Image: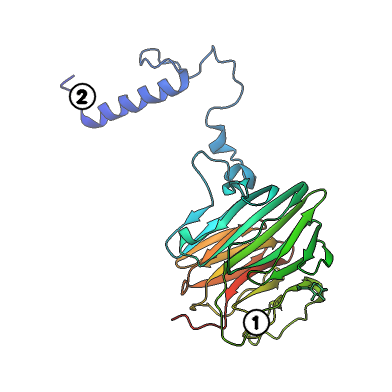
Amino acid sequence: MQSFSPILLLLTLLLCLLNIAVTHQGFCSAPSIIDANSNNNKPLYSKVINPTLAPHHLQDLPGFTRSVYKSDHALITPESHVFSLLPDWTNTLGAYLVSPAMGAHFVMYLAKMQESSRSGNPSKDVERFVFVLQGLVKLTNASGVGQTLTVDSFAYIPPNSEHLFESYESATLVIFERRYAYLENHIPESIVGSTDQQPLLDTPGEVFELRKLLPTSLSYDFNIHIMDFQPGEFLNVKEVHYNQHGLLLLEGQGIYRLGDSWYPVEAGDAIWMAPFVPQWYAALGKIRTRYLLYKDVNRNPL
Ligand SMILES: *[C@@H]1O[C@H](CO)[C@@H](O)[C@H](O)[C@H]1NC(C)=O
């Protein structure tokens, strides 16, 4: 053995390892290259020679998730939805996607209303924005006036304002809530509307289509934007600003840049953006991207 050169030793070792891999016997004595006893017709290393490129396979690796949580942003993909009963609601499951534990001053959550379900009230001084993703809900306000909200409809409920959402079959909502920042002589009012009834707004220097679901007046301390991008369109401005965002991708797919990370995203993904995190989006794929975006406005951050 002493006469073996290191190269020869290495070669022997390699041949030995190859043999173990081929024969599965784990003992380096039989120098046969083909395992005659193998019933498996699949070539060894078939995944290397013939890789599976289906996206769902690429995402189905042990320990892999697209969800990310960092100090200044988070990407919450559908596999990270954790539903449990919403307190004060009946027959309704909720999954929080953005919460103050991340550093946000608001919550964003999905509410799955089931048969004969009813909403509970937000805490004192908390305002609520509801957008219907699936099904229909009936909203009854403090005067007892009822309105039916279908997909793409929304409602804003000012703080401490009595109201009730009811679903007879099933409905899925995305809801934003925050403690209202009062401003002297400005009182927010209830609003019910539908996305397609909101006018397209000018977006100087940009190509995306913008609708705002709430009035831009001082009575409101946040707004909800609906932003549409055709495939290939992207934000010209690389935004870095004091406002926070909660985003839900409603349609399409693309790349979201958050800080120094670029994330492939698709409909169903939710994003939290802290103040001043660099942010940018490009729509890809074959259909338009539409996302819904919370943005705090009209208040002094001090
Ligand atoms: C309830 O809705 C009706 C119809 O939109 C409206 O006229 C009324 O002022 C609302 N009441 C309250 C308390 O918001």
Residue plotted at (51% across, 63% down) = 262
**Callout 1: 10 Å neighbours few (<14), some, many (20+)?**
few
- Residue occupied by mark 1: 187
Where disc 2 sits, the SS reads: loop
Instruction: Measuring from the top left, give residue 142's x and y in whole percent.
Output: 76, 68
Instruction: Measuring from the top left, give residue 213's x and y in whole percent.
Output: 71, 75
Instruction: Measuring from the top left, give residue 151's x and y in whole percent.
Output: 80, 61
Residue sitting farthest toward the front: 143
- Residue occupied by mark 2: 4
Q: Quadrant of the N terminus?
A: top left
Q: Amino acid at mark 2?
A: Phe
Residue plotted at (62% across, 61% down) = 122
Up/down of 200 relative to 31, above or below: below
State which quadrant residue 266 falls in: bottom right
**Callout 2: 10 Å neighbours few (<14), some, many (20+)?**
few
Picture quadrant of ligand 1: bottom right
Q: Amino acid at mark 1?
A: Ile
